[in-house]
Amino acid sequence: MATHEHAHRSPRLHLPAVFRRPRTGSAAGTALGTGTAQAQALALLRILTGFVFLWAFLDKTFGLGYATASGKGWLDGGSPTKGFLGSVAAGPLRSTFHAWAGDSWADWLFMLGLLGIGVAVMAGVALRPAAAAGTVMMALMWLAEWPPAKHLADGSPSMSTNPFADYHVVYAVALIAVAAAGAGTTWGLGRLWARLPVVRDHAWLR
């Protein structure tokens, strides 16, 4: 008995549209389609990461009673860097951070950085500059906390939970990921931002 093989009729698993791989390569090097599950997941990561920075700015500015006590906000005369940098107790830059603590330039640079990064990332604009600025900020804060230390300068345990991959590293990688993926086009103003003449002429502003 002869058998007939129909190689072109192989069974196919039908997946929902959001899980199907695009059939064209036109998306290479550009942002993901705004309707894909990947794009929406990156947009959610972008918004939440941006809110981390924006919330820190709001709490430190107005003293909302969370990380910054009520009445101790920036507008109340408090310094957003004095407590953190002044309490650095480990690491090679301990004396440098102590010298910076509470200086006006440090307060303004830190707060403008939090505000600018938070607004830009949540809005989905200027993701590359925001990722660069946020990575530098997170690197400095990582150096200030110095997770590799097992003991502080006074000999007490540092209580570090991981010698490298703490939350500062995670936030920096999240910023880089959303910028590299062009995640501002989903649930954001990324497309409008990219059409601005200055942004078209200077790709690093995207």
Image (cartoon, rainbow, N blue to C red):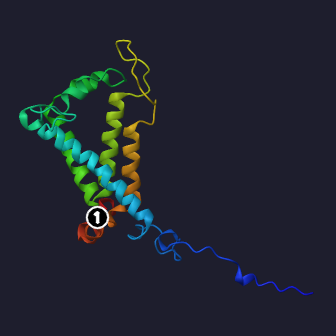
Secondary structure of residue under mark 1: loop
Above or below, comparing residue 182 to residue 83 in the picture: below
Residue with the most extreme left position: 76
Amino acid type, label 1? Gly
Residue pictured at 45% horizontal, 67% vertical: 29
User: Residue 125: image x %, image y %?
Assistant: 27, 61
User: Residue 46: image x %, image y %?
Assistant: 34, 55
| Residue to which mark 1 is pinned | 188
Residue with the most extreme right position: 1
Q: In which quadrant of the rendered image does the N terminus lie?
A: bottom right
Residue 105, quarter of picture: top left
Q: Is residue 75 left or right of residue 178?
A: left
Residue 103, quarter of picture: top left
Count up the numbered dots: 1
Look at the image and tell me whether residue 201 can be seen: no
Query: 37 or 171: nearer the eye?
Result: 37
User: Residue 195: image x %, image y %?
Assistant: 27, 72
Q: Is residue 12 left or right of residue 62?
A: right
